[in-house]
Image (cartoon, rainbow, N blue to C red):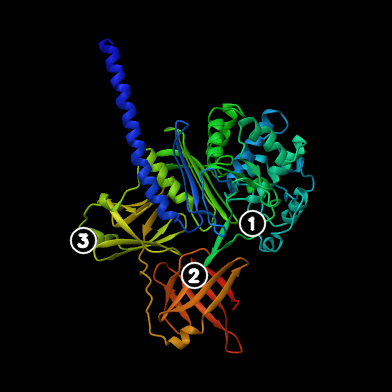
């Protein structure tokens, strides 16, 4: 072996060893965070990480079936919810390439009786969530028909006469009705059902053998059963698959989703110029970026662009992230909608590209006098308010309606939120203190006001009064807040959320210390507590007592 060949061999050998060592280090880090997020006795998750198309991590955690004690396996099939929208968007692009539709086509070309209120509502508006059409999942009467099967046109008739939320292109608002209509358009122009179209044009050609249109009746091998948390775990509520349809009715595995990712990357289904349309950051009529393309959201991780989407449907929560510059793909699927795979998958992706979240170890010391200058009430251009406080030389931030979170300095004027990519930077302009808050790609600026920091005065209330408020209060069908009396404390817990204590400032008004809100219990004419009102972020949320 000559010198040049020896050198090349050694470089290749050490490169391989380095890659292996990196993968082993990542495996331990991934295991630790996933084991914490998905404990062995609860509903589980399947996670996959691939670099340059090669799987470097694929494991399962927790239980796929609580009743039978079946553990989760890596090949489990999950309902993927709104990740379905990627397949719907690409189906539209395929039909566009076939000359069967144009993205500027008005929806009345396909649904002649659709009320557009004089506006031009295009396929592009539907794809980008900018149509202004009311999303059926925000309709109050939707909850009453969850179990009912609809034909596509019947369900469009169910929501089409709702008033529009805004003029097309004026705002961005996530919209399941829009993607339902896209499914119907696919059927009209292709002559196939939506299920047939995605199966014959996408799943079968790509070899996605474990991806299906959802069904409650079919035997689907390795199906993970879906759960919800209402105090204890329960089987997920029944939802007819005719309703999520092209907006969220597909089922798949993390490995099949990697096949999908590679097919999109290599332009197997549509041309590059077509798929580029799906990854364009579109604008509203006023020029503001929406950070969304066609079926994919656009974001970043510490400066690295991402193409991603989450999915949430009764009993399941999913997330997938792709970083095109680094060619890294991450997917995490869970069989409980009480979980947030987006948090853990984003952290995994950050580790995979060697841009991890900052930790307490990265924090530096900042003099207390400077920290005092930052304390105050800040109003931001996105109409949110943040209260910055100082306790024991530690700075805290609390957005209206959210919990208080500690800030850790990485520079004298720049602070990060623990276990998050969010950060806030302060800057003094003359006599004015300004703050710039960023949550990944989203950024907003704020100004310190002269408003006083709101305070609640805690008082003592007898246990007898506190016990009057015990019960379950319904906010809307399927979403309740339970009020309990535990060890002398009044505790509240929303469906699928963490339990926290509320403190009395009067005999009927209470407040949490973890976020900015108030809860007032209402007495009826008979002297019984029959409801409460939550005051949060300028809203009044009413809960009717059920028990």
155 up-or-down from 48: above or below: below
Q: CA distance from mark 1 to mark 3?
A: 49 Å
Q: Quadrant of the N terminus?
A: top left
Between circles 1 and 3, the one closer to the viewer is: 1
Which quadrant of the structure image shows residue 92? top right
- Of circles 1 and 2, which is in front? 2
Seen at 56% across and 31% down, the residue is 263
What kind of element bears circle 3? helix
Q: Compare marks 1 and 2 and give the one earlier in the sequence.
A: 1
Classify mark 2: helix, strand or loop: strand
Residue wearing tag 3? 369
**Mark 2, residue position:** 493
Taking the spot 54% from the left edge, 58% from the top edge, the residue there is 66
Q: Mark 1, residues whose alpha carbon is within 10 Å: few (<14), some, or many (≥20)?
A: some
Residue 115 is tagged as: none
Crowd tier of the residue under label 2, counting other residues whose Cα lies within 10 Å: few below 14, some 14–19, many 20 or above = some
Mark 1 secondary-structure assignment: helix
Decide which of tag 1 and tag 3 comes sooner along the chain. 1
The residue lying furthest to the right in this view is 113
How crowded pointer 3 is (Cα within 10 Å; few <14, some 14-19, many 20+) is rated as few
Which is more N-terminal, label 3 or label 2? 3
CA gap between label 2 and label 3 equals 39 Å
Alpha-carbon span between mark 1 and mark 2: 23 Å
Q: Position of residue 24 (x, y in %)?
A: 35, 39
Label 1 belongs to which residue? 137
| Mark 1 vs 2: CB contact within 8 A | no
Can residue 258 be seen here? yes
Residue 388: x and y in percent read: 34, 62
Where is residue 438? Give x, y as percent.
40, 49
């Amino acid at each position: 072996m000559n010198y040049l060949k020896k050198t090349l061999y050694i470089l290749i050998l050490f490169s391989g060893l380095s890659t292996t060592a990196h993968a082993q280090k990542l495996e331990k880090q991934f295991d630790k965070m996933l084991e914490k997020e998905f404990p062995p006795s609860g509903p589980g998750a399947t996670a996959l990480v691939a670099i340059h198309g090669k799987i470097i991590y694929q494991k399962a955690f927790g239980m796929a079936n609580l009743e039978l004690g079946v553990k989760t396996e890596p090949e489990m099939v999950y309902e993927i919810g709104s990740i379905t929208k990627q397949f719907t968007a690409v189906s539209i692009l395929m039909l566009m390439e076939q000359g069967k539709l144009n993205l500027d086509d008005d929806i009345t070309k396909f649904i002649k009786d659709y009320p557009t209120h004089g506006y031009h509502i295009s396929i592009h508006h539907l794809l980008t969530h900018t149509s202004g059409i009311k999303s059926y999942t925000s309709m109050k009467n939707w909850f009453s028909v969850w179990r009912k099967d609809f034909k596509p046109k019947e369900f469009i008739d169910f929501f089409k006469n709702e008033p529009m939320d805004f003029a097309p292109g004026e705002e961005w608002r996530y919209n399941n009705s829009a993607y339902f209509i896209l499914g119907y358009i696919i059927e009209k122009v292709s002559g196939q059902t939506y299920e047939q179209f995605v199966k014959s044009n996408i799943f079968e050609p790509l070899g996605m053998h474990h991806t299906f249109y959802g069904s409650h009746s079919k035997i689907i091998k390795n199906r993970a059963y879906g759960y919800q948390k209402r105090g204890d775990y329960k089987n997920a509520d029944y939802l007819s698959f005719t309703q999520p349809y092209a907006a969220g009715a597909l089922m798949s595995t993390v490995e099949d989703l990697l096949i999908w990712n590679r097919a999109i990357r290599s332009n197997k289904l549509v041309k590059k110029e077509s798929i580029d349309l799906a990854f364009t950051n579109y604008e509203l009529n006023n020029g503001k970026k929406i950070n969304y393309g066609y079926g994919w959201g656009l974001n970043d991780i510490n400066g690295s662009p991402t193409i991603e989407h989450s999915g949430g449907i009764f009993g399941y929560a999913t997330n997938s992230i792709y970083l095109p510059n680094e060619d890294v793909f991450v997917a995490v699927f869970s069989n409980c909608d009480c979980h947030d795979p987006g948090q853990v998958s984003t952290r995994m992706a950050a580790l995979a590209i060697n841009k991890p979240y900052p930790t307490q170890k990265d924090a530096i010391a900042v003099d207390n006098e400077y920290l005092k200058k930052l304390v105050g009430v800040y109003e931001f251009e996105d109409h949110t308010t943040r209260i910055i406080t100082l306790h024991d030389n530690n700075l805290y931030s609390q957005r209206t309606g959210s919990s208080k979170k500690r800030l850790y300095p990485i520079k004298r004027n720049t602070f990060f939120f623990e276990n998050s990519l969010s950060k806030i930077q302060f800057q003094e302009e003359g006599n004015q203190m300004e703050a710039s808050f960023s949550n990944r790609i989203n950024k907003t600026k704020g100004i310190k006001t002269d408003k006083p920091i709101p305070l609640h005065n805690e008082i003592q209330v007898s246990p007898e009064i506190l016990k009057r408020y015990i019960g379950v209060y319904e906010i809307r069908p399927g979403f309740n807040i339970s009020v309990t009396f535990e060890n002398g404390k009044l505790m509240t817990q929303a469906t699928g959320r963490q339990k926290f204590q509320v403190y009395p400032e009067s005999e009927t008004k209470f407040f949490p210390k973890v976020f900015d809100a108030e809860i007032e219990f209402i007495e009826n004419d008979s002297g019984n507590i029959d409801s409460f009102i939550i005051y949060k972020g300028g809203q009044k949320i009413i809960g009717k007592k059920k028990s």
